[in-house]
Image (cartoon, helix red, strand yellow):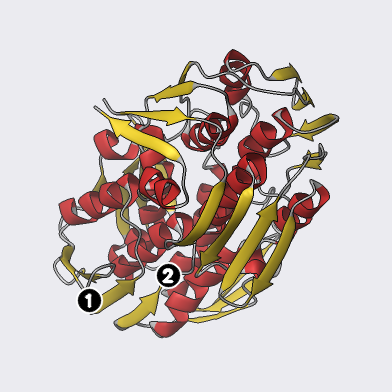
């Protein structure tokens, strides 16, 4: 099992490219299930979760071939058994995204209840509620969701809570349903907008993505298309937080500032200078960092996937920060590991009180989930001495060659078996 070893204290300087967004690529890959024609997806990141999704689609009979360096061509003409088995779904919650497309295309699906990071319950009841409103019959059998529907029919669906994968699942299913589907209280995340763009490129009729009401007029069939995945806003935010903590000057090419307003505002509040153009973001961080309060919220609020990285940044900032997590009930597991490096963090329910310290000291720490892993990297870049991060397979689920990119910026980081 690999680990990362970081010699802290080096400022970050230079330019790197941002990869395609994991949380956009995964639903877009599952959209291939909706058509017999080839869907070519470009700017697909090389990640463990992407490999898992391609494996899952392959088991169902989807053929996949490389298309250039960062592209994959998918063809689902010969779909076999519409089953998403536990051995794959348990490692990645996004596997549940095959449920809607399979039901819409084949009229049946058998999908294991999902797994993924241990950061909270993340129930799938909103997915099931929406599909049932569209006429699906769904039962639970030995840990599997077993769904059937001769043809889904459009419906008006009001989500009880904002759910990104729930919105995406219903949006894909509705693309081939009979009639109009309206999703109210829909997720507004940029990744939802990206999926809508791909579906429309395939011949779907989706309007309103990016607002809390999405309307889908179902069509008889979808066709193949070529679509480029958006840049990863969480990878972007992670490198920006790392630069703000370690100091230096970093430019991120291929990044989009228009989908990171909440994060950029907090970085500026922390004392960093941030400049941006349509296809790059540059950060300069010198001198003392200031503690910043934050509260996670659905987009366009502060993203829960950036909370851990900012806890690490606040750990070495001047002052005390109050960080409130409103999305997941178990997302402060990184606090205990950051304390091993010398951070002063107290967790009370869904709130962490972070008192900045003058320095962190290297130690051996253990990654507990994907974004917690990123927070330990940020802290390790600042800590005095050597920090060893174990169980970095979590990190590989969502960051493409993070140690190589950080090395190009001057970080002293290496991967060891």
Q: Position of residue 165 (x, y in %)?
A: 51, 53
Question: Neighbour class for label 1 at 10 Å: few (<14), some, many (≥20)?
Answer: some
Q: Nearer the viewer, residue 378 or 337?
A: 378
Q: Is residue 173 left or right of residue 35?
A: right
Quarter of the figure that contains the C terminus: top left
Quarter of the figure that contains the N terminus: top left
Question: Neighbour class for label 2 at 10 Å: few (<14), some, many (≥20)?
Answer: many
Q: Residue at x 37, y 83 (%)?
A: 220
Q: Residue at x 54, y 38 (%)?
A: 10
Q: Quadrant of residue 121?
A: top right
Please tell me whether mark 1 or mark 2 is closer to you in this view.
2
Residue bearing mark 1: 36
Q: Is residue 69 left or right of residue 235?
A: left
Query: Is residue 113 visible to the viewer in this orientation of the structure?
Result: no
Residue 376 against residue 124 in the figure, above or below: above
Q: Is residue 371 left or right of residue 394?
A: right
Q: Nearer the viewer, residue 188 or 360?
A: 360
Q: Position of residue 23 (x, y in %)?
A: 47, 55
Could you tell me how far apart the alpha carbons at marks 1 and 2 are, in whole angstroms? Answer: 21 Å
Q: Residue at x 79, y 46 (%)?
A: 270
Q: Residue at x 47, y 25 (%)?
A: 368
Query: Is residue 333 visible to the viewer in this orientation of the structure?
Result: yes
Q: Nearer the viewer, residue 81 or 4?
A: 4
**Which label is found at residue 405?**
none
**Which label is found at residue 229?**
2
Q: Position of residue 353 (x, y in %)?
A: 79, 24
Q: Quadrant of residue 89?
A: top left
Of helix, strand and loop, which one carries label 1?
Answer: loop
Residue 143 against residue 96 in the figure, above or below: above
Count of numbered tags: 2
Q: Nearer the viewer, residue 77 or 307?
A: 307
């Amino acid at each position: 099992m690999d680990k990362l070893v970081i010699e802290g204290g080096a400022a970050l300087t230079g330019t790197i490219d941002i990869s395609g967004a994991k949380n956009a690529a995964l639903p877009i890959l599952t959209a291939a299930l909706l058509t017999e024609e080839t869907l070519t997806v470009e700017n697909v990141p090389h990640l463990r979760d992407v490999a898992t999704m391609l494996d899952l689609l392959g088991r169902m009979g989807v053929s996949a071939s490389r298309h250039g360096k960062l592209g994959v061509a998918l063809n689902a003409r010969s779909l076999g058994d519409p089953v998403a088995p536990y051995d794959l779904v348990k490692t990645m919650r996004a596997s549940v995204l095959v449920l809607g497309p399979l039901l819409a295309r084949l009229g049946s699906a058998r999908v294991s209840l999902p797994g993924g990071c241990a950061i909270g319950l993340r129930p799938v009841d909103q997915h099931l509620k929406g599909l049932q409103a569209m006429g699906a019959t769904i039962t639970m059998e030995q840990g599997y969701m077993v769904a059937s529907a001769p043809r889904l029919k459009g419906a008006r669906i009001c989500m009880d809570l904002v759910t990104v994968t729930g919105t995406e699942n219903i949006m894909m299913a509705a693309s081939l349903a009979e009639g109009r589907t309206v999703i109210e209280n829909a997720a507004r995340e940029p990744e939802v907008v990206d999926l809508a763009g791909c579906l429309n490129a395939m011949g779907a009729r989706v309007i309103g993505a990016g607002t809390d009401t999405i309307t889908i007029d179902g069509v008889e069939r979808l066709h193949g298309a070529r679509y480029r995945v958006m840049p990863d806003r969480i990878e972007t935010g992670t490198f920006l937080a790392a630069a703000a903590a370690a100091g230096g000057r970093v430019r991120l090419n291929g990044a989009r500032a228009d989908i990171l307003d909440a994060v950029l505002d907090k970085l500026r509040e922390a004392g960093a200078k941030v400049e941006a153009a349509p296809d790059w973001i540059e950060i300069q961080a010198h001198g003392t960092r200031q503690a910043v309060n934050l509260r996670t919220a659905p987009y366009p609020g502060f993203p829960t996937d950036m909370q851990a990285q900012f806890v690490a940044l606040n750990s070495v900032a001047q002052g005390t920060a109050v960080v409130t997590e409103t999305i997941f009930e178990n997302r402060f597991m990184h606090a205990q590991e950051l304390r091993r490096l010398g951070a002063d963090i107290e967790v009370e329910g869904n709130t962490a009180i972070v008192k900045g310290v003058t320095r962190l000291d290297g130690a051996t720490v253990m990654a507990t989930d994907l974004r917690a892993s990123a927070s330990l990297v940020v802290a390790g870049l600042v800590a005095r001495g050597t920090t060893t991060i174990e169980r970095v397979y979590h990190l590989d689920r969502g960051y493409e060659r993070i140690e190589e990119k950080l090395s190009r910026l001057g970080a002293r980081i290496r991967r060891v078996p």
